[in-house]
Image: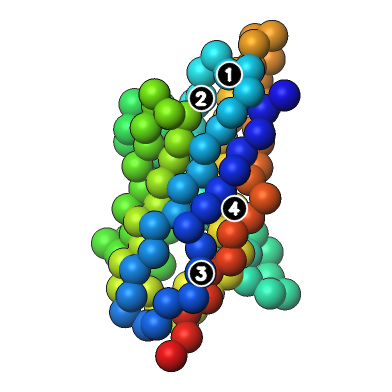
Amino acid sequence: QVQLVESGGGLVQPGGSLRLSCAASGSIRSIATMGWYRQAPGKGRDLVATITSDGRPNYSESVKVRFTISRDNAKNTVYLQMNSLKTEDKAGYYCNENIVDGDFTYHEHWGQGTQVTVSS
């Protein structure tokens, strides 16, 4: 069974920084695209950033330049460095990993979510 565990959320002032981490564990053969999504209260879940297995990133326009996604394949972990945070970045952040497990079955997995609050 594959499990994703997120960490790194919290409260930060506007202009501050946070780094989110999401580690996958369990029977994993390989991980394709990894990503981060966010969901504000009363809204849908939106793409923040993704990164392919060979390290190519993709960002939503609202976070481009301010956020950086990266991955450590040896640790099955994806990171999101968030700089110059704005109040509108406040949301629950969810990692997403597309994983081939030990039975050679491809599944999409989600983390439990971590809250990011940007407030003065």
Residue annotated with mark 2 = 31
Which residue is located at x 41 percent, y 46 percent? Answer: 79
Residue annotated with mark 3 = 10
Single out the mark in the foreground, 2 or 3: 3
User: Where does the image place residue 83, in percent across and percent down from the top left?
Assistant: 31, 67
Q: How far apart are marks 1 and 4 (CA)?
A: 20 Å
* Amino acid type indicated by mark 1: Ile
Res. 40 image quadrant: bottom right
In which quadrant will I find the N terminus? top right
Residue annotated with mark 4 = 94
Residue annotated with mark 1 = 28
Q: How far apart are marks 3 and 1 (CA)?
A: 29 Å
Q: How far apart are marks 4 and 3 (CA)?
A: 14 Å
Sooner in the amino-acid sequence: mark 2 or mark 3 = 3
Q: In this view, does 68 lie to the left or right of 47?
A: left
* Amino acid type indicated by mark 3: Gly
Res. 54 image quadrant: top left
Report crowding for label 2: few under 14, some 14 to 19, many 20 or more residues within 10 A (C-alpha): many
User: Where does the image place residue 80, in percent across and percent down from the top left?
Assistant: 40, 52
Residue at disc 3, secondary structure:
strand
* Amino acid type indicated by mark 2: Ile
Q: Which of 12 and 62 is in front in this view?
A: 12
Is residue 48 something that shows in the picture? no
Which residue is located at x 43 percent, y 29 percent? Answer: 75
C-beta proximity under 8 Å, tags 1 and 2 = yes
Sooner in the amino-acid sequence: mark 4 or mark 3 = 3
Report crowding for label 4: few under 14, some 14 to 19, many 20 or more residues within 10 A (C-alpha): many
C-beta proximity under 8 Å, tags 2 and 3 = no
Which residue is located at x 44 percent, y 40 percent? Answer: 78
